[in-house]
Image: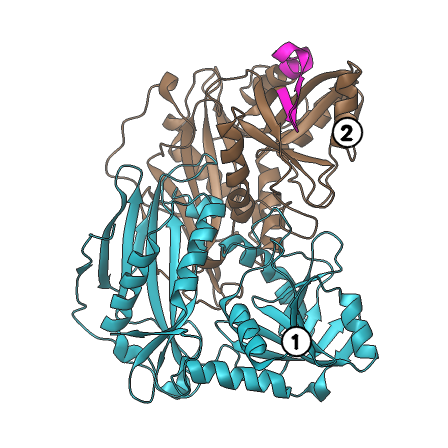
Chain colours: A brown, B cyan
């Protein structure tokens, strides 16, 4: 794979770029995309950068029927010096292969795909916005393409990378959100696909999201699928609680996603000397700490939102208002530090950023 | 919806039809397909029958990322008198809407889509094969098409129906299969999407299937995701056990699919006066009945295979050989009766078949 040349076909026309202050999340795409194909005979082949365009598939392609697919999400940031930085992209490549393993999709050459990703971002680097809170969202994904209705792993695949200039994930920016603790619907269970970044987990989450939005909540907090007692994730983010000066987050139990932002936050907290534990956390423990006045901050972490403070948790009608519904000082500090590192505004102590040249 | 006219574009060329004895499952498709689109403004619109052809979608279309999709599977059979019969197709339309509800996909007009399906089958009715065990497999499916990377229900969809002439689902025909009782991987859990016919359930099943095949088993038997003790489904079929003259099958607990063949088998057994119960069944109970010599027959039910006898169950290394690895007499009788009704060879006592004219 490493010796394969990436063919580049330049787009004949360039699209108009949206104003930095009018960016939404994931609605506009850049001029080019990367793709390569897989067959049993050739392995991954024909890596190429082509103009962003629709793709054509047989209606029997397995992706439409059995959901054998994985994806990743990461961002490129523009620094004041007009450099373009990626944030820990090798973690995404590593996770893509972990997801591939669970979904019976052939492994990729992580270095090769990361290199292709950099070439693509570099070609479309004028699309990396510069306003505060903006970035270029990068979506690598793999879909199964064999036209066959038997339930079996596909024999052919397509890997693609598309790019989208984005503003903040939440329209509110970094303002606390209201979260509904979900009791009826389940996102994932041990032995399922919860730790893989795959379509079915997100499809399963839509209904709970819809119900909670009707009640004025912007996300749901998932409990474990077995006892409906232990905390898993919030919406499509990992979650952290600051209780009496200590930070806790659910351990990687096999049914939650190993977030790159989650890992970065844990590293930052350790560096700062803030006690942080990865362990099983019950919703009862959170409720008790709230009742005792020890629940100081709650926040979600993810690539799209970076840090998303939680201002209220609704658990079976009990409304836990956290830090008076305001962003906590630790949440703010983490957000400021992470975004500063991502945007090259402060020293990259952990060697997390990678420049695209 | 009911007043909308279905536009028909005839295929200019007709494909060669495969010989009846060379049919596989789900690899060859007929000359035409049905499709219609959905938007928030128009609802379902532009119902049309067009030549079977690839479809073109934006790479950001939600189906490729978040798996918001549902499908159905049913069959058309050719009778000796050259009539074409469908088997309980209204049940599939009803279930499609139940799946839609769980996946936040807009409801369809069941009568309209069933009528469209009949028109399509009628147009391609030369494709309905006549040899024993063959049929025309019908695959209605809905995919989310909005080009948007936010995790939310899509605002646009495409409903399609494609047709595939098929032989037996299992190459072995109605011969007993060996089944591996799965302990590590989980297909679905209460509160998840198990009772919906949606891609993610099938994607989640691939890994266990792959592992069991390497050990010489053709399918896995799924246990519940919570205690890993109660029986759910086998592969992509429902499952029945005949124990000491009585038949039991797992109840519709929210995590298994409500199979049309399952329902038909229960009805047949009741009609014959064979005791049949839908209830929770533990794998321990099955093992005990095996040890006591009371486990007489085991079989899976599904549209693709109709009846699939189980000759061996491997539970943690304990190999339960059922009925000496041979097809049981009740399994055979159910298979013969159902396929005879489906093919119009015996009176349709339950009014299950619908002629396509």
Q: Position of residue A244 (x, y in %)?
A: 80, 16
Chain of residue at mark 1: B
Q: Position of residue B254 (x, y in %)?
A: 60, 53
Residue shown at 27% from the left, 62% from the top: B116
Residue B46 appears left or right of A68:
left
Do we see residue A55 in this rendering? no
Q: Which residues are magenta?
A: A312-333
Residue shown at 40% from the left, 88% from the top: B345
Magenta region includes residue A279: no
**Image: A252 above or below A70:** above
Which residue lies under the disc numbered 1?
A: B275
The numbered disc on residue A284 is 2
Q: Position of residue A169 (x, y in %)?
A: 48, 25
Q: Nearer the viewer, residue B71 or A341?
A: B71
Label 1 and label 2: CA atoms lie apart by: 45 Å
Same chain for the residues under marks 1 and 2 in the image? no
């Amino acid at each position: 794979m490493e010796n394969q040349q990436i063919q580049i076909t330049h787009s004949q026309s360039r699209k108009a770029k949206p104003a930095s202050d009018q960016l939404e999340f994931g609605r506009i795409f850049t001029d080019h995309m990367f793709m390569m194909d897989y067959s049993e005979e050739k392995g991954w082949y024909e890596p190429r950068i082509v103009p962003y365009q629709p793709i054509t598939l047989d209606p029997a392609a397995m992706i439409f029927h059995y959901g054998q697919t994985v994806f990743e999400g990461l961002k490129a940031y523009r620094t004041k010096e007009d450099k373009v930085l990626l944030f820990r992209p090798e973690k995404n490549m590593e996770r893509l292969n972990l997801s591939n393993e669970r979904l019976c999709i052939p492994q990729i050459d992580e270095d090769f795909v990361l290199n292709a990703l950099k070439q693509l971002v570099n070609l479309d680097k004028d699309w990396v916005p510069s306003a505060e809170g903006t970035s270029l969202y990068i979506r690598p994904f793999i879909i199964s393409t064999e036209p066959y209705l038997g339930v079996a792993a596909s024999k052919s695949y397509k890997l693609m990378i598309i790019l989208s200039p984005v503003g903040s994930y939440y329209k509110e920016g970094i303002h606390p959100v209201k979260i509904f603790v979900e009791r009826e619907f389940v996102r994932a269970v041990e032995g399922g696909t919860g730790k893989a970044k795959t379509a079915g987990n997100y499809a399963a989450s839509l209904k709970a999201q819809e119900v909670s939005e009707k009640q004025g909540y912007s996300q749901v907090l998932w409990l474990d699928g077995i006892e409906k007692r232990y905390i898993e994730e919030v919406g499509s983010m990992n979650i952290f609680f600051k209780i009496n000066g200590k930070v806790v987050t659910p351990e990687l139990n096999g049914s939650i996603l190993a977030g790159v932002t989650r890992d970065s936050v844990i590293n930052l907290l350790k560096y700062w000397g803030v006690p942080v534990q990865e362990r099983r956390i019950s919703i009862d423990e959170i409720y008790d700490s709230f009742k005792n006045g020890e629940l100081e901050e709650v926040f979600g972490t993810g690539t799209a939102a970076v840090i998303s403070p939680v201002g209220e948790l609704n658990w079976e009608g009990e409304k836990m208002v956290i830090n008076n519904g305001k962003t906590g000082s630790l949440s703010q500090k983490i957000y400021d530090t992470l975004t500063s590192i991502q945007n090259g505004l402060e020293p990259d102590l952990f060697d997390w950023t990678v420049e695209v040249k």
